[in-house]
Amino acid sequence: MPELKIPPRDAIDTVRFAPEAKMCEDLIQSSQVTDVLEKAKERMASEAQSRRRMLASSLRINARMMPRLIRIVDTARRIVHLDEMPVETYVRCDPEPNACCMRHGDGPFYLMINSGLVEKLDPHELLFVIGHEFGHALYGHHRLPSMGALQALEVPRRLALRLLAWSRRAELSADRVGLLCCQSLNVAAHSFLKLSCGLTGEHVQFNLDDYLMQANDFQALSSSEPDSRDLFTSHPFSPLRVIALQHFWNSQTLARLLGRSEGGQDNGDVESLINRLLSHMEPDTTGEDETGLQTCLLWGSFWIALADGALDPKEVTAISRAFDSPQVAERANATLGESPDALGHARQQCLEAVAQCQGAPMPQRQGLIQQLIVVAQADNRITSEERSALEEISRALGVDSIFIEQILLMFT
């Protein structure tokens, strides 16, 4: 492994992706996120429970047992200035090439590395991945709900999409820490190639220019052929991550930290350019009729909730959480209570609102269907009547019913 530069202690804060840091703080201060975190706490294991599981199911390693891997971990620790902090490193028998780093409060860092990752990557590539995982822990990314928590908890669509947008940016912040550790764009990109195709250097000859060409092709095609399923992913696609790292590699910030010659791209320009890259995975709100979408969501939710003949309290709660003001759902519920045909009234109001949504971009209409699925699942089941209502609303919105299947697979 080549000699690596130890950057100053404040380098970790310096390299963090600025849009991610701002989104993280804004979300943490949100009352909606606070409510979600309180629910998530009930499902989370304590530090003692997590450590017990690691001790029971994996191997805690030291320099006597796995000297090569511990040297890599210690190198990453020195670069990110964790060499004086307690870190327990574990290796788990799992062919999936993955790793994670956990920390409870101000306690020790727990680094878990799957055996598949150790077998697939060389020492320099492992340094990138281990640095990436330390980045997540140092930035406190665990403070916000993970994809697993979003799937298990009742989270309003808008908030879920904001959290997923932040999660994608959090990966870019962690990637930068990994790059700071391995100090080679070629190594970082090679790591992504191995992890994405599943092959080692024995089977594929890596060329950075060729991989960047694929990344650029993906970026160009994403501009003209967006896929709404991108909205519900917690990680940016590997090609976008490599492009983002390439821009950051050429930034003034990294040039200074690694002692390269003066120059490089302006830091503000780099952040703006990378943030725009992520727009390929996020909804286009151009032309969105917010009033029509919200009205359609309100009455569509009640239509689905009433479709099986009974309005479950859990469904009412799920509807209320979909709106910034719970009174919106309360007033609609009161109106339905005065109607001799509550189901018919909700259906009619929904279909009338659909006409106002025709100009909304497809991702917005698909996102509306996703939120209606949350309401349908609130009582832990989707009846055939609720399914029929979902399909009728989808047809009215011009959304292919296959989208319902896709969301059910992703969120169940």
Image (cartoon, helix red, strand yellow):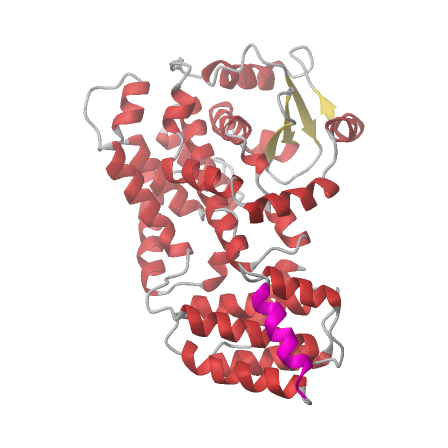
Q: Residue at x 60, y 16 (%)?
A: 70
In the rendered image, residue 231, in percent from the top left (x then y), is placed at 48, 57
In the rendered image, residue 396, in percent from the top left (x then y), is placed at 50, 83
Q: Is residue 68 left or right of residue 49?
A: left
342 and 58: which one is in front? 342
Above/below status of 231 relative to 6: below
Q: Residue at x 55, y 62 (%)?
A: 323
* Secondary structure mainly formed by the magenta segment: helix
99 and 403: which one is in front? 403
In the rendered image, residue 326, in percent from the top left (x then y), is placed at 59, 62
Above/below status of 280 relative to 380: above
Q: Is residue 7 left or right of residue 148?
A: left
Magenta segment includes 233: no
Report the span colored magenta.
327-339
47 and 211: which one is in front? 47
Q: Residue at x 65, y 47 (%)?
A: 149
**Residue 34 appearing in the image:** yes
* Screen quadrant of the C terminus: bottom right
Magenta segment includes 328: yes
Q: Residue at x 37, y 35 (%)?
A: 18
